[in-house]
Image (cartoon, grey):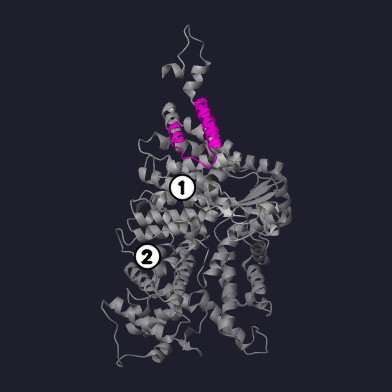
Amino acid sequence: MIRTDRDLPDLDDLDALDDLDGGGGPDLPAGGTGAAVTIDHNDGQVANVVYGGLHQYVQRVRDYHELSAEYVRDRLAGFVDPGYRTLAGDRLTAETAVARVRRSGGVILIGGPGTGRYTAALRLLHGTGLRLREIRPTFDPARGEQLTIAELPVAPGYAYLLELPEHAPHIQYGFARDIGAYCDSLARRSSAIAVTVTGTTWEQLGAVRDGPVLQVAAPPADLVLGRRLRQLRPDLALDWLAGQPQIAELLVDASPAEAVRLAQLAADVLTTQPGPAGPPVTAESNAGRQLIEALVSAYHNWEVELTAWFHHHPDPRHRAFLVAAAALEGAPAGRVLGAAEALDARLAGTDAPPAGLGHAGVRTLVEAVDAYLDDDLTVRYRRARYAEAVLDFVITDRADTFQRELWRWVSELPLRGGQRRGPVDRAFATRSAELVLHTALRRRTPEILSQVAPAWSRRAGLRGALVHVLGIAALSPEIGAAVRQQLYRWAQGSSNPAVLIAVAEVCGGEFADFYVEQAMVRLGHLARHDIAEVDEAVLTALAALWRRPALRQPVLLRLAYWLADDQPRRAALAAVALNLLGRPDQPRAGDGSANGPVDPADDPAHRPADQLAGPQTLVRQPDRVLAELVAATPVVQDAIGVALGRALDVRQLPGGVETLLHRWFDDAAADPGLVDALTHVLGRTVTAGPAAARRVARLRALLTAWPATDDPARQAELRRYLVDQLRRADPIAARLRSAPLLSSPLPSAAEEL
């Protein structure tokens, strides 16, 4: 049941967050309605809290979307001029290509996956000297929508970056034909755009052979390797590395992305296998030879070594410890052993892991998997990226059923003692969340998230970690599109309340900062479910979005669509949401303190000192929705008006609409600056389709039932004014007023009475 406005808490009460610890908060069942989740209780991203090492991922995706100066500088530090080519085959330097972009207003950069076309586009846009801005299209592939030229921005003084989807059906046919005209319009406004696209997609769009089209030629892999190594390890002279036969063989067919990976692996190898202090790392030194040997193996994901290891270690206990150490590298040895025994028992189909002295202990197992115990007795591998390689090996070397069991096991790692109903270990919740996210991004497999979501969404101590993982993944360049579609499918069709609540919390978090339209669409689908705790989660998410001024108008526009919807559940929830979001704070004294006089120096309104004497000076706070409508675009004002009109067409008004309108009447009576916005909205309410006279009658009835205010004269004046405006907005009444006079005049209202 959707709560009425009398049940709603203060908006500021919605800031409370669960602590990701100790299993606090209710657990939800796998299906059906469980214990109600109150609106002032949330495990999600409402306050932009990020747990543990997930900070780095959050900053990474924000930098990616915001094109921060530090992010661009870091990307371009490893840039190697790829050599831009026209479709006719002419080669252009980066400087020549930049001049061309400024002159034509844009460029379409065509290149295959891993060719560095994204960084090449950044280089051109950065060279224009304009402010960089990413274009995040508002179309939603999950709903079958397409990217169109019409939604691209045309503000002056910007250098826009647009990455076209790799699937041509997500782009409106004719995009390639119209992009040239769009670039011309940008050039006239001293702006520019760089569009990146694969050659296959461009051909499917009906490739245009003339216009601002350039091909990105992949730069030599050895130059990319050398540049990146100098960036990662400026303290070492490693230019010799690319010339070694074993490394040169790896670079023959390597893409720029693979060369960058090789450089990162070299840096990791040098960290895990440092050479002796003093002598430089050269091709002739022992450290150099060890670096080359380890680098080649790491580049091939240690596949030869792992194949040999599994051949010589058939014992399931050893294999389980190998996987557990990979999933929990850096964890205490006892915890790794417990996790390994739980995995072994799960795969063997037994209820409990073995115990006692009849099996190998930690030291034997650590030695068997080529790991070591550090000074803190945590388990670590000696080889660079070996943990990743182990997981990749067992995932690709086993059936799908093993993968499902593996991630179910991972989902239970944060539970102390491995008990499914046990308390949650905060540190291991963070560690497991990082493992899931890192593996999903690295392998570009969003399916991993779907396998842990049901279990983690049911636990209050784990749902927060899940929400952050889903939010980061939804914004990531690797799997963002797929995760956004998964959120849509869950919101639309899942019957698991716990998963639906997690989706609502994702939509109330940082995801909405970049994709507010998609967040609201998914919340709209959640609003259709007849589950009380899901409704509460949707309201909590809406309250979180409302606290961000930049998102308020998109939120209002989408709420207007909900209120006008034929689906009564969503319309009712929209009415409750508008009432909640609009409800003002309690009247404040001075600058907000009712406990004494206010220092004039602290008063933001700079009122005279005699008005700041103490609690008797109350400042009325207007309805927040009405105040936002004053500055809203006509599109938003009209949408709210039409939605209210549809609500008035219903025999039973959605709960909260009457209270909302009466509050708006109160505010307009107290503040003349709100009258115009209110009049405009009510005018659109009247004209929202046929039966305008019925809506006028219902609005007049609401005005008649308007409770008395502290200023009866002003209330009566506003009531008369609004009634007159409603009469003027009624199209039937307007036609009667403009009709020629009849031979006998119509009777007056007094005569009729």
The label on residue 567 is none
Q: Residues within 10 Å of mark 2 (few under 14, many from 20)?
A: some
> Is 402 within the magenta?
no
Choose the circle earlier in sequence order: 1 or 2. Answer: 2
Q: Quadrant of the C terminus?
A: top left
The amino acid type found where label 2 is placed reads Gln
Disc 2 element: helix
What residue did someone put label 2 on?
451
Q: Of helix, strand and loop, which one carries label 1?
A: helix
- Give how far across and how far down residue 465 sits, in percent: 45, 68
User: What amino acid does circle 1 point to?
Assistant: Asn
State how many labels appear. Answer: 2
Query: Between 491 and 753, which is closer to the camera in this rendering?
Result: 753
Q: Position of residue 602 (x, y in %)?
A: 68, 59
Image: magenta residue range: 700-729
**Prevailing secondary structure of the magenta residues:** helix
What distance separates the C-alpha of mark 1 from that of mark 2?
Answer: 38 Å
Residue at the left extreme of this rendering = 350
Furthest toward the bottom, the residue is: 357
Viewer-nearest residue: 90 or 56: 56
Q: Position of residue 473 (x, y in %)?
A: 48, 62
Task: From the image, state whether disc 1 or disc 2 is nearer to you.
Answer: 1
Mark 1 sits on what residue?
A: 579
The residue lying toward the viewer, choosing from 411 and 701, is: 701
| Residue furthest top as drawn | 743
User: Which residue occupies 41% across, 51% down?
Assistant: 6
Q: Badges 1 and 2: C-beta atoms under 8 Å apart?
A: no
Task: Please tell me which residue is depicted at 57% across the width and 72% down the height of the picture.
Answer: 262
Residue 190 in view here: yes
